[in-house]
Amino acid sequence: MTRRLRTSTALAGLLLLAACGAAPDDGGADPAAAAPTTTPSGAPELDVEVVADGLDHPWDVDQAPDGTLLLDERAGGLTAVLPDGTVQPVDADFDDLFADGETGLMGLTLDPEFAEDRRLYTCQGVQEGGSAEIQVIAWTVSADWTSATRVADPLLGGIPVNEASGRHGGCRVEFGPDGALYVGTGDNAVGTNPQDLGSLAGKVLRIDPDTGEALPDNPFTGDADAADRIWTYGHRNVQGLAVRPDSDQVYSVEHGPDRDDEVNLLQPGADYGWDPVGSGSYDESVPMTAEGAVPAVWSSGDPTIAPSGATFLSGEDWGSYDGLLMVGVQKDTGVLGLRLSPDGELLEQFRVPELEDSYGRIRTPAQGTDGALYLTTDNGGGEDQLLRVTPRR
């Protein structure tokens, strides 16, 4: 397969923006506190239907051009929901899955050229030869959605994992507007990882989806002291990646410690400020964004809500919700809506009323190819669901 990747012609300008945005953490206004919290006028009423149930910690979901939905579960396993509503398992080899705590089978995305190549990507813990790591694996799925086969095993390896607890394993995969594959990783609860440019932990990576190699215009290409797949660093535990339609913007979502969950606008080579070495090996009392780092677009302040996956809504049917960034909520329940200006400034925030205190924790919101918003719940015990949310007509 030959793929055309668009290099980042705006790299130099974005690096300048990163430098300009790296304002000191001077205790100024919290971007969350400055925004209104009421539902916007003209908000559509929403219908919510259950597409699949009996799931256990479904982590991610994506929709194929033919309307089929593919989702995964953290403990292992793929499930397809066919256009006629049939829910069926997809046979796939997860015998080497490392699933412990927060780590397991996590991010999933279909290739933009899926209609031709039937290729998909997962990010998962892998146990091999007595040691574990996190890997991105490429698969192809059969035409009848009954089986998936590994074709790049791994596409990308060497992402560290916390073998003792599985804490802060990340891991989200998402195609950018440039055709590159972005990979959001966790810091493994190791204090030195987020600022260590030789480690793939606590980073957002940018790779060629065919080879797993760094793109030639990545910010650390040619730097002998840095991993060339790194796009951004200084992250705690990247749980979400979202691409803004009709733009070059990629946003990350991550958990703070006991305050300051964040949404960040990614800028190549930028430091997002998590540096938990402090007075010990993992000092979670330090600020989420250290002095001199790029400030967050949105921050929860105190208390945290544990945001997870995110997606931008697009389409006239969504009325005043068109263009919103929808973020899953894990510590509380429901979905957070954020309206951002063209340059990423927070304009308003609110919780979607139809989803508040109704379905529990939301792991992943994803807009499908059909325009609907799909949500995976994350409550455990075989009680989880895949939901379809649409504006009422």
Image: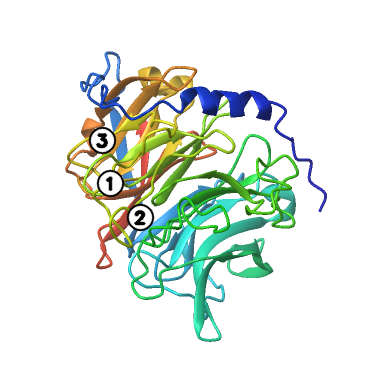
Determine if residue 272 is in view. Answer: yes
Determine if residue 392 is in view. Answer: no
> Quarter of the image holding residue 149?
bottom right
Q: Amino acid at mark 3?
A: Ser
Residue at the spot x=67%, y=30% of the render? Answer: 11
342 w.r.t. 387: above or below = above
Of the numbered discs in the image, which one, if any, rests on residue 286? 1
Residue at the spot x=30%, y=40% of the render? Answer: 48
Which residue matches tag 2? Answer: 277
Residue at the spot x=37%, y=69% of the render? Answer: 166
Q: Nearer the viewer, residue 35 or 393?
A: 35
Q: Amino acid at mark 2?
A: Val
Q: Residues within 10 Å of mark 3 (few under 14, many from 20)?
A: many
368 lies left or right of 373 = right
Q: Residues within 10 Å of mark 1 (few under 14, many from 20)?
A: some
- Of the numbered discs 3 and 1, the one sitting upstream in the chain is 1
Q: Amino acid at mark 1?
A: Val
